[in-house]
Amino acid sequence: MITSERALGARYRNLYDESVKTTLDLHDGLVAEAKALAAKQRSTLTRLVEEGLRLRLQAAVPPPRTGAVKLPVFKGRGGLKRGIDPTSNKSMFAAAGDE
């Protein structure tokens, strides 16, 4: 089961069985090329269409984020005012007037 099937499976799990028969309106030339390719690969048109749909659906799912997220860093001038201890919450609150 592919990722998109899992995502849709929860919503539509009771709607369909394993396979669905459907009608598609396709350009005649496209169907002829697809049938020729399927025959060359000793496969069926159905398998070719399924493979194409799976590839497109997998490409539509964004890849999961891996690794660390780069956070922005302020590289400006300045810093804390004199007399403020950055390791003391009490000192920080006093400087902010939130004592």
Image (tube, rainbow, N blue to C red):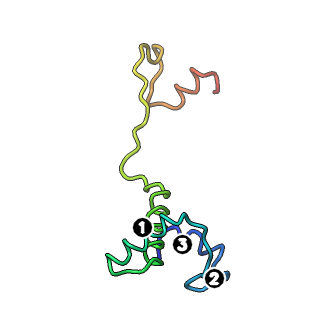
Separation of disc 1 and disc 2 at Cα? 30 Å
- Tags 1 and 2 touching, CB below 8 Å: no
Q: Position of residue 91 (x, y in %)?
A: 52, 25
- The residue where tag 1 is placed is 33
Residue type (three-letter) at the residue carrying disc 2 = Tyr
Task: Point out the frontmost of discs 2 and 3.
Answer: 2
Is label 3 in a helix, a strand or a loop?
A: helix
Q: Residue 59 location, x and y as percent?
A: 45, 58
Name the residue that disc number 2 marks.
Answer: 16
Q: Which residue is mark 3?
A: 6
Residue 40 shown left or right of residue 15 in the figure: left
Q: Name the residue at 60% across, 86% down.
A: 17
Cα separation, mark 1 vs mark 3, equals: 31 Å
State the residue lying farthest toward the bottom. Answer: 17
Q: Residue at x 47, y 54 (%)?
A: 62
The residue drawn where x is 45% and y is 77% is: 45
Q: Earlier in the sequence, mark 2 or mark 3?
A: 3
Residue type marked 3: Arg
Q: Earlier in the sequence, mark 1 or mark 3?
A: 3
52 lies above or below 95: below
Rendered image quadrant of residue 25:
bottom right
Query: Of marks 1 and 2, which one's residue comes earlier in the chain?
Result: 2
Nearer-the-camera pick, 96 or 33? 33
Q: Judge whether 94 appears above or below 15 on screen.
A: above
Q: Are marks 2 and 3 in contact (CB under 8 Å)?
A: no
Q: Is residue 52 above or below residue 13?
A: above
Closer to viewer: mark 1 or mark 2: 1
Task: Provide residue 18's location: percent of width, then percent of height.
Answer: 55, 85
Label 2 Cα neighbours within 10 Å, binned few <14 / some 14-19 / many ≥20: few
Q: Position of residue 52 (x, y in %)?
A: 45, 67
Residue in view at x 58 percent, y 23 percent: 94
Q: Which residue type carries mark 1?
A: Glu
